[in-house]
Image (cartoon, grey):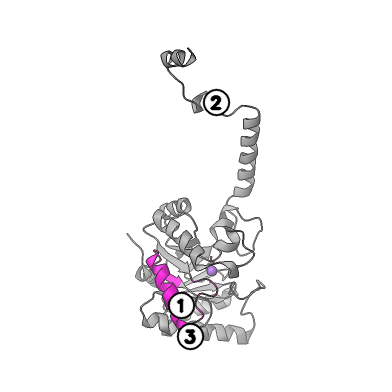
């Protein structure tokens, strides 16, 4: 069954948690679908996690579209969200054109950061399924610090969340805020909240898939490393190199042979 925004909203109403992960490629999408992930996010986190960019600001619309198409080939049931990257929603017209492009490439919903109210209004007026993103905004906040610890910041964030819901967004990502603030926003909104470093009370959780697999060299407090991809992969690459050099690989089971007659003819 294809999951949609109504399905995610129903999960919130039932008090069931929404499971979300980022995804950037076909094989991972296949596995995320098998694992029952509700919401796949093709985020601009692809830049620093997969493409080797120094920041989210380098990610282009073409980058997102390329990875989005790969993910869509691998997963048909999860709800698929694509990020509008930095600089692609500066004006309402530009945002609409780019959002329509990502939807045409297979996204079910697009996400933008912060409170560009005119852009949000324009997209929603044109029936673009839209997700908000408040708290830490990686496209513009260079320093990755917890947001909304102070009363005035927290109050502004609650107001922004309510305003976005009123404008018609379908979901809201909350990044790197205190758990209490994540809970208050989640209780005030009817639409689902998806937290990353936003505590235990948001309607769903999302993490960077590279972080949970242990692909990322750094360790973040908000993430949990479930697997040591780096260590295992390095060992495997070294073992392969060793086996080639020592002529341990390929072995009999990896090769094919000619029939004796054919071989004799060839030799003659
Ligand atoms: O880019 C991204 O991966 C995101 C998620 C963390 C929500 O925006
Ligand atoms: Na993002």
CA distance for labels 1 and 3: 12 Å
Judged from this view, the residue extending furthest toward the left is: 1
Q: Which mark is residue 106?
A: none
Q: Is disc 2's CB within 8 Å of ligand 1?
A: no
N-term-proximal mark, 1 vs 3? 1
Quarter of the image for the N terminus: give it: bottom left
User: Residue at (65%, 33%) from the top-left corner?
Assistant: 242
Please give the range of residues in magenta.
84-110
Residue 15: give x, y in percent of width and height: 42, 69
N-term-proximal mark, 1 vs 2? 1
- From this viewpoint, is residue 15 visible? no
CA distance for labels 1 and 2: 56 Å
Q: Mark 1 vs mark 2: give the one in front.
A: 1
Which of 153/82 is in front? Answer: 82
User: Residue at (54%, 66%) from the top-left corner?
Assistant: 44
Disc 2 marks which residue? 251
Question: Residue 92 magenta-drawn?
Answer: yes
SS under mark 1: helix
Which of 218/256 is in front? Answer: 256
Residue 35: give x, y in percent of width and height: 44, 53
N-term-proximal mark, 2 vs 3? 3
Disc 3 marks which residue? 117
Residue 8: give x, y in percent of width and height: 39, 68
Disc 1 marks which residue? 95
102 to the left or right of 228: left
Residue 260 in which image quadrant: top left
Q: Residues within 10 Å of mark 3 (few under 14, many from 20)?
A: some
SS under mark 3: helix
Q: Residues within 10 Å of mark 2 (few under 14, many from 20)?
A: few
SS under mark 2: loop
């Amino acid at each position: 069954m294809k999951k949609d925004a109504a399905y995610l909203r129903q999960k919130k109403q039932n008090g069931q948690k929404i499971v979300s992960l980022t995804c950037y490629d076909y094989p991972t999408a296949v596995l995320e679908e098998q694992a029952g992930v509700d919401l796949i996010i093709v985020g601009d986190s692809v830049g620093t996690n997969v493409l080797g960019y120094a920041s989210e600001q380098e990610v282009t619309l073409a980058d997102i579209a390329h990875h989005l198409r790969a993910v869509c080939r691998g997963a048909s049931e999860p709800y698929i969200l694509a990020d509008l990257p930095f600089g692609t929603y500066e004006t309402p017209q530009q945002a609409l054109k780019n959002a329509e492009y990502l939807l045409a490439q297979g996204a079910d919903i697009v996400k933008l950061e912060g409170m560009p109210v005119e852009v949000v209004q324009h997209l929603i007026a044109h029936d673009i399924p839209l997700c908000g993103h408040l708290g830490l905004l990686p496209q513009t906040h260079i320093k990755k610090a917890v947001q909304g610890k102070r009363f005035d910041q927290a109050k502004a964030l609650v107001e922004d969340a309510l305003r976005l819901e009123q404008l018609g967004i379908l979901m809201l990502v909350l990044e790197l805020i205190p758990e209490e603030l994540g809970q208050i926003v989640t209780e005030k909104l009817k639409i689902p909240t998806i937290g990353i470093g936003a505590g235990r009370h948001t309607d769903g959780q999302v993490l960077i898939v590279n972080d949970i697999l242990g692909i990322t060299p750094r360790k973040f407090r908000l993430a949990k490393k479930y697997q040591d991809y780096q260590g295992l992969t390095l060992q495997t690459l070294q073992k392969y190199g060793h086996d080639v050099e020592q002529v341990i690989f390929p072995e009999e089971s990896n090769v094919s042979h000619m029939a004796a007659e054919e071989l004799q003819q060839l030799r003659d």
